[in-house]
Image (spheres, coloured by chain):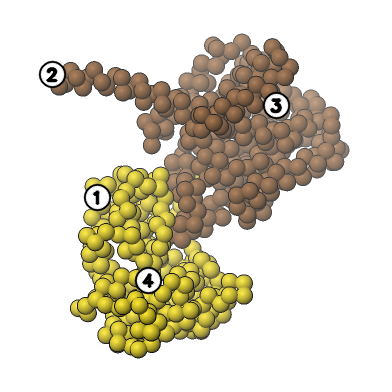
């Protein structure tokens, strides 16, 4: 394991991100969005990087979370902590169901099944417009309150999300470093052998799926509270694609890579979309570049940069030692 | 407990219309070294697949210490005490040698590994098992190296080690010496013979020197059936075996 990938360094990087974003960015909304997507992308990384599962279904869980927040707050005024809890539980359950079917198949067929489920859930949301608001989505999702004080300022809600982000990031660090996480790596490396030495591989994959789905739904709910609506786009296939693109740009070998991937994508789209309406084209070029030259993503660059730096520092010291 | 560790009754495996294995009656005695020989395509590896649950038996029955395991899944059979090594090396190449063995040892109690907050270091017996196997294979000096970076001989030893780490009753080795150099082969021979003391070893091998030297029983297979079964001396002198092997002389000294 690379020195920058140890749990201590990773959590420090996450903490530094939370503390620095308010100083770097003017928009609290953008900063909050980065943290929300960072946890969602890290959850996708658990599947892609650690288990080797390319899931096009992440949008299902994200959308589910936004609808849970939308429905529960606008219809029944359910308290926010309970809303978030329901999102996590439901996200985990739906992911278990989707995983249970998809994981029966491997490779391309698995990917196609997750894609099919993504489309199915999109049309379900579109069709059951009494619940989901169909094309219009659900409007008027309120911000959470803390001690009677509504977090309607951008940075107030940022702090609220930051706590969730740090907790989720720590949870994922524990999961990826547990026996479970290390078994996932083994499954990614050589699934046949993992089964041959006694691991019920499907169960491990389903569990990874459930954890990933629960976190993604939490992210979706937090996002609905951020922007005040639960839009149909949240459950669209495009959301799945965006989460995957962020994961790949960030690099799939480290959790903080996912934070970088989310940040890079959102900052780039925020900057470019002002300059040029066809900015998605440029994003395509970025993705091609990453796929061709930087397969380990932004995180790979960071590791390489660190190694070069460490090498340079070690060099003179060694010479001094020789003398 | 009977002294038969692993037994098959009329075992058959069918791939489509092709009978890869038919009517195989095998019985492997406890704590014996039992080898399976036969020309390519005789069904040796298919039999291993059927015994470990990688492929389903289309007919017949498999018993492990008197218990019917024909319908048990492959990971269930590991818990019941069958472990195997592969003919083509199949490791976790990017993980360290120690991690490979730790996983193999953990595979015996996989439910622990489903707890997402449990640290690997919490299973002391698993770590001890991995270290014991490293010592047994004399691979301590490369324990932290990625398995994919090891030499072929080291990888073949690790391949066998993966099976040992599961603490199996019956250990199945599929051509453990394939592609090994002469020096390494001697070490492997000693290893297999030693394994026979605390385990039951069933192995497929083409190197007749090893087969004749360390086997208690030899089963000769041809075209998906067993041809002859018996102690080395008997098998070597059997006219049917000689005919099956034609040009391939069975040589090697009997210890």
**Image quadrant occupied by the C terminus of chain B:** bottom left
Disc 2 secondary structure class:
loop
Task: Say which quarter of the image contains residue B228.
Answer: bottom left
Residue A323 numbered mark, or none = 2
Contact, CB < 8 Å: mark 2 with mark 4? no
Which tag is nearer the camera, tag 4 or tag 3?
4
Which tag is nearer the camera, tag 2 or tag 4?
4
Residue B26 in the image: state x and y as whole percent. 42, 82
**Local crowd size for mark 3, using a 10 Å CA cut-off: few (<14), some (14–19), many (≥20):** many
The residue tagged 1 is B140
Chain shaded brown: A
- Residue A50 in sight in this render: yes
Q: Earlier in the sequence, mark 3 or mark 2?
A: 3
The chain to which mark 3 is attached is: A
- Residue B164 in sight in this render: no
Task: Say which quarter of the image contains residue B194.
Answer: bottom left
Same chain? Circles 1 and 2: no
Residue B33 in the image: state x and y as whole percent. 31, 75
Which residue does the image show at 62% across and 35% down from the upper left? A244
Which residue does the image show at 61% across and 10% down from the upper left? A26
Which tag is nearer the camera, tag 1 or tag 2?
2
Contact, CB < 8 Å: mark 3 with mark 2? no
Residue B204 numbered mark, or none = 4
Residue B30 vertical placement versus A151 (above, below): below
**Image quadrant occupied by the N terminus of chain B:** bottom left
Contact, CB < 8 Å: mark 1 with mark 2? no
**Local crowd size for mark 4, using a 10 Å CA cut-off: few (<14), some (14–19), many (≥20):** many
The residue tagged 3 is A225
The chain to which mark 4 is attached is: B
Q: Earlier in the sequence, mark 1 or mark 4?
A: 1
Question: What color is chain B drawn in?
Answer: yellow
Which residue does the image show at 49% across and 32% down from the upper left? A296
């Amino acid at each position: 394991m690379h020195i920058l990938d140890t749990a201590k360094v990773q959590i420090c990087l996450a903490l530094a991100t939370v503390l620095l974003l308010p100083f770097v960015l003017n928009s609290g909304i953008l900063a909050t969005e980065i943290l929300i997507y960072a946890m969602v992308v890290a959850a996708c990384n658990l599947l892609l990087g650690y288990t080797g599962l390319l899931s096009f279904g992440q949008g299902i869980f994200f959308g589910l979370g936004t609808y849970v927040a939308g429905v529960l707050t606008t219809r029944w005024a359910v308290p926010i902590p309970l809303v978030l809890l329901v999102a996590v539980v439901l996200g985990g359950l739906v992911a278990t169901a989707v995983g249970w079917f998809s994981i029966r198949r491997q490779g391309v067929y698995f990917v196609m099944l997750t894609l099919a489920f993504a489309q199915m859930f999109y049309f379900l949301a579109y069709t059951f417009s009494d619940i989901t608001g169909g094309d219009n989505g659900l409007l008027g999702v309120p911000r959470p309150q803390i001690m009677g004080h509504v977090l309607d300022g951008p940075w107030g809600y940022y702090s609220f999300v930051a706590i969730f982000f740090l907790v989720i990031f720590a949870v994922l660090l524990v999961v990826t470093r547990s026996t479970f996480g290390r078994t996932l790596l083994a499954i990614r490396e050589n699934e046949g052998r993992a089964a041959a030495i006694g691991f019920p591989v499907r169960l491990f994959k389903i569990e990874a799926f459930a954890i990933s789905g629960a976190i993604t739904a939490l992210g979706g709910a937090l996002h609905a509270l951020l922007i005040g609506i639960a839009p149909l786009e949240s459950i669209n296939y495009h959301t799945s694609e965006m989460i995957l693109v962020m994961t790949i740009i960030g690099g799939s070998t480290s959790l903080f890579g996912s934070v970088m991937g989310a940040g890079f994508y959102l900052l780039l789209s925020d900057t470019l979309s002002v300059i040029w309406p066809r900015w998605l084209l440029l994003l395509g070029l970025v993705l091609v570049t990453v796929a061709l030259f930087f397969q380990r993503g932004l995180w790979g660059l960071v590791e390489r940069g660190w190694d070069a730096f460490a090498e340079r520092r070690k060099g003179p010291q060694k010479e001094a030692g020789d003398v | 407990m009977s002294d038969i560790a692993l037994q098959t009754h009329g075992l058959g495996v069918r791939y489509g219309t092709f009978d890869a294995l038919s009517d195989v009656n095998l019985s492997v005695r406890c704590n014996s070294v039992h080898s399976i020989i036969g020309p390519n395509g005789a069904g040796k590896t298919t039999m291993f697949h059927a015994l470990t649950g990688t492929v389903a038996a289309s007919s017949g029955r498999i018993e492990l210490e008197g218990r019917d395991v024909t319908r048990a899944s492959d990971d269930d059979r590991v818990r019941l005490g069958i472990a195997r090594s592969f003919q083509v090396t199949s490791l976790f190449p990017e993980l360290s040698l120690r991690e490979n063995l730790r996983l193999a040892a953990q595979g015996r109690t996989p439910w622990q590994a489903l707890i997402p907050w449990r640290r690997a270091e919490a299973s002391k017996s698993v770590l001890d098992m991995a270290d014991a196997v490293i010592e047994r294979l004399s691979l301590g000096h490369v324990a932290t190296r990625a398995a994919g970076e090891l030499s072929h001989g080291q990888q073949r030893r690790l391949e066998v080690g993966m099976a040992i780490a599961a603490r199996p009753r019956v250990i199945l080795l599929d051509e453990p010496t394939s592609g090994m150099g002469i020096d390494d082969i001697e070490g492997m021979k000693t290893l297999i013979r030693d394994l026979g003391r605390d385990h039951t070893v069933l192995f497929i091998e083409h190197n007749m020197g090893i087969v004749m030297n360390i086997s208690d029983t030899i089963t000769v297979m041809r075209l998906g059936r067993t041809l002859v079964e018996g102690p080395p001396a008997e098998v070597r002198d059997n006219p049917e075996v000689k005919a099956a092997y034609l040009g391939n002389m069975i040589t090697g000294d009997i210890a």
